[in-house]
Amino acid sequence: MYYQTLIKKSSAHLSTLPISSQTKISTNVFSSGALWMHQRLNEITSSNRGLLTNINFAFYGLLKYSISLALCIASAILFYKLHPLFIPLCVIVFYLAEVQFLFLFPLILEGVQTPILTSIKQTYKTGIIKCAANILPIGAYMLFGLFNKKAPLKNWYIGCMCVLIWYNDEVRSRL
C-alpha cells in the first residue's frame, strides 16, 4: 500500500467521526494516543477488544523516540564531520530507525507478547525500503500539518490512522 492511498483512506475514515473523538495533546501523550489508536483499531477491525490497562505506553513511546533521536543526533555529528551540508540526511536516519517500530503500538494494542521484536520482524517482512518510502512522506505530512492554525493535529491523526490501516491491511493477517 502506498502513502497516497493510506492518506486518502485515513482522511475518509476520520471524516466520519465527530470532532470530539479527536483527543487533545496532554502530558500523558503516549497513553492518550494509545487510547485513541485503540478506538480507531477497533473501528477498522470491527472488534470490541478492551484496552490493556497494565501497559506502560510511555515506556514504549519514549523507547521508540529515544532510539530514533539518539541515532539521528549521532548521524548528524558524523555527517557534520564529513561536510555540514550532509546534516539534513540525519532526518533519513531518524526515520530508518523509527520505521523499525512502525507497527509497535498496534501490536501492543492487540496484545502481542513481544511487540518490539514483532514490529521489527513485520517491518522487514513488509519491506524496509517500502516502509521507509511510505513513512517518510507520511511523517512529513504529519509535521507540516502542525502549521495549520485551525487544526494543527488533523494531519497527525491522519498519519496515525495511516499506520493502523496499513497494519490492518498488510500485517495483522500475518500474525
Image (spheres, grey):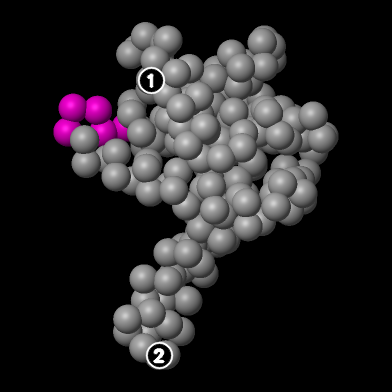
Amino acid beneath label 1: Gln
72 w.r.t. 52: above or below: below
Between 157 and 114, which is closer to the camera in this rendering?
157
Question: Which residue appears at 50% of the width and 24% of the height?
Answer: 9
Q: Position of residue 32 (x, y in %)?
A: 46, 28
36 w.r.t. 147: above or below: above
Q: Quadrant of the C terminus?
A: top right
Between 168 and 109, which is closer to the camera in this rendering?
168
Q: Quadrant of the N terminus?
A: top right
- Quadrant in which residue 51 is drawn: top right
Magenta span includes 173: no
Magenta span includes 152: yes
Q: Position of residue 84 (x, y in %)?
A: 32, 84
Query: Regarding mark 1 in the picture, which secondary structure is present there?
Result: loop
Q: Nearer the viewer, mark 2 or mark 1?
A: 2
Query: Regarding mark 2 in the picture, which secondary structure is present there?
Result: helix
Q: Position of residue 111 (x, y in %)?
A: 74, 30
Amino acid beneath label 2: Lys
Read off the magenta span: 149-153
- Residue of label 2: 81
- Residue of label 1: 22
Q: Inspect this view and state whether residue 120 appears.
A: no
Point out the tag, 2 or 1, that comes first from the N-terminus. 1
Q: Position of residue 80 (x, y in %)?
A: 37, 85
Q: Inspect this view and state whether residue 46 appears.
A: yes
Q: Which secondary structure dominates the residues rendered in magenta?
A: loop
Kindly give the residue lying farthest to the right in the view shown.
Answer: 175
Q: CA distance from mark 2 to mark 1?
A: 43 Å
